[in-house]
Image (tube, rainbow, N blue to C red):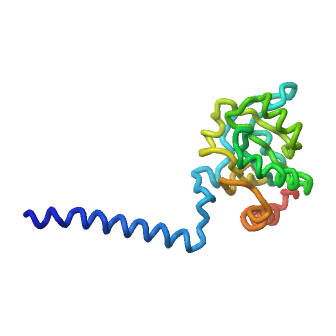
Amino acid sequence: MKNKKLFLPLLAFLALVVVFAWQLARNSAGDDPKALESALVGKAVPHFDLPALHPNEPAFGNELFQQGKPLLLNVWATWCPTCYAEHQYLNQLAKRGITIIGINYKDDQNKAVQWLKNLGNPYQYNILDTKGMLGLDLGVYGAPETFLIDCNGVIRYRYAGDMNESVWQVRFKPLFDKIIAEDATCKA
C-alpha cells in the first residue's frame, strides 16, 4: 500500500509533462497564441448602445457594423503602451482606405480625445466604453485587441496584440480579401 502512494506524485508529474508537451507541439505547429479563440467568431457583434468618444457626436449602436464593407474594430486606451506602439500603423491603414472603428476601453475621455488630437485619428467612429461593458461582451482581455468584422456585422477574426504590417499582411489582409470575394454585395 505504501509503494502505491509513492507512484501518485510520479503519475501527476507525467500527466503534466504530457499536457505541456502537447501545448508546445500545438504552438510550434503554427498556431498563433495571440489569435485568441472566441465564442463570437461567426456571430454578430453584441448589441450595444454607447456614447461617442467625442462629446458632440451622437451615441452609437450596431448600425456601425452594417456598412456593406469589411472593417476593423480596434480596442484601445491611452493607458496602454502597446496601443501607442500600434497607433501609427492604424493611421497608415486608415489612409489606405481601411475602415477602423475604435472602442476606447476603460479610459479617461479627455485623455483619449487629446491622444487622438496629438497622434492622429485613424478611426471613422470611436465608441466610449468607460465601464468596459462592450469589451466584456466581446470577451476582451485587454487592449489592444482587433476584430475583423465582415460586411454583415459578423465577427470573422480576433487578434490580441499590436497591429503592424506583418500582422496585417499575414493575419488580416487574406481574410479581408476573402470576405470581399465571397460576398458580391461587399465593397472594398
- Res 33 → quadrant: bottom right
Judging depth in this view, the residue of 107 and 98 nearest the camera is: 107
Above/below status of 77 relative to 12: above
Q: Is residue 115 visible?
A: yes
- Res 169 → quadrant: bottom right
Residue 31 x/y as whole percent: 59, 67
Q: Is residue 68 visible?
A: no
| Quadrant assignment for the N terminus | bottom left
The number of numbered discs placed on residues in the rendered structure image is 0
| Quadrant assignment for the C terminus | bottom right
Residue 56 x/y as whole percent: 87, 25
The residue sitting at 74% across, 47% down in the picture is 83
The residue sitting at 64% across, 54% down in the picture is 42
Judging depth in this view, the residue of 146 and 13 nearest the camera is: 13
Looking at the image, residue 75 sits to the left or right of residue 140; the answer is right
Above/below status of 47 relative to 148: above
Residue 183 x/y as whole percent: 80, 61
Farthest residue, direction top: 56
Residue 105 x/y as whole percent: 69, 37
Above/below status of 62 relative to 58: below
The residue sitting at 56% across, 74% down in the picture is 29
Looking at the image, residue 50 sits to the left or right of residue 92; the answer is left
Looking at the image, residue 18 sits to the left or right of residue 108; the answer is left
- Res 46 → quadrant: top right
